[in-house]
Amino acid sequence: MNGSLYLFPVLPEDAPDLAPVLGVIEALQIAGKPLTEALDKRVFHAGDGFVREVIFAGCSPHLRFEPTHTDDRDFCHLVLHGPLPAPRLFTGSRTGWPRCPSCRTRLDDWRVRATAPLSAQPCPACEVTCRAIDLDWRKQTAIGRLLVELRNVFPGEATPSDRLLSVLREATGSDWRYGWAAMSEAP
């Protein structure tokens, strides 16, 4: 199983309205039809624009866009998260050590810090206090209150197009970034 590419506002505390985000992913055809028959539109098949707006590295990525059975989640699809009451930090099995934004020291206690992403703790090297959400994770996490999860992509091999990030910024008034992490527990 691969991980996910997450898109989220640069400021983790920001929670733009979901409607313009949904409008962007539908207008750019990143989202196709809903994956479930749920009334709230939160889980989607990948649309025709998915491969236009998500850039894959490598000469021949293996992408599967349809499930092979009812419980299959190992295919490219989208999940919308939020707005959540507080920022959530998504990590993965390959998440490396983040660095202090002040002195660049590698923080070995990142798993403890990740359990409370808004809690400020001092850096053991320079003693500057910072929150887990403010550490330099080198795009190996996703942090936010509103996130677009693009599932079943290998970390580092898929990035959003500049156009996608730009259109999200125009629609929400917030700058957006991306990171890779494990798939969420959501459907």
Image (cartoon, rainbow, N blue to C red):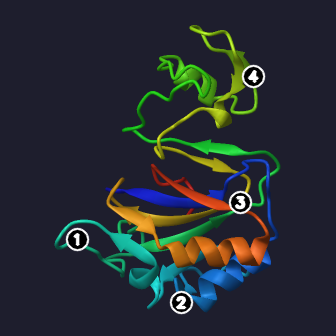
Q: Label 2 vs label 3: CA separation?
A: 19 Å
The image shows a total of numbered marks equal to: 4
User: Where does the image place residue 60, in percent across and percent down from the top left?
Assistant: 17, 73
Q: Which amino acid does label 3 sit on?
A: Leu
Relative placement, left or right, of 154 versus 138 is left
Q: In which quarter of the image is residue 38?
A: bottom right
Q: Which amino acid does label 4 sit on?
A: Ala
Task: Looking at the image, tell me whether mark 2 or mark 3 is earlier in sequence order.
Answer: 2
- Give the residue drawn at x 73%, y 81%: 39
User: Residues under labels 4 and 3: Cα distance?
Assistant: 22 Å
In this figure, which residue is indicated by the disc labeled 2? 29
Distance CA(mark 2)–CA(mark 4): 40 Å
Q: Is mark 3 on a helix, strand or loop?
A: loop
Classify residue 161 as left or right of residue 119. left
Disc 1 designates what residue? 61
The residue labelled by disc 4 is 120
Residue bearing the label numbered 3: 146
Closest to the camera, between mark 4 and mark 3, is 4
The one nearer the camera, 65 or 21, is 21
The structure residue drawn at horizontal position 35% and vertical position 54%, both measured from the top left corner, is 156
Q: In this view, does 40 lie to the left or right of 76?
A: right
Rendering coords of residue 72 (x, y %)? 38, 69
Q: Residues within 10 Å of mark 4 (few under 14, many from 20)?
A: some
User: Height in image: 173 above or below 180?
Assistant: below
Q: Residue at position x 47%, y 60% from top?
A: 5
Q: Which amino acid does label 2 sit on?
A: Gln
Q: Which amino acid does label 1 sit on?
A: Pro
Q: In which quarter of the image is the N terminus?
A: bottom left
- Residue in front for this viewpoint, 66 or 163: 163
The CA span between labels 1 and 4 is 40 Å
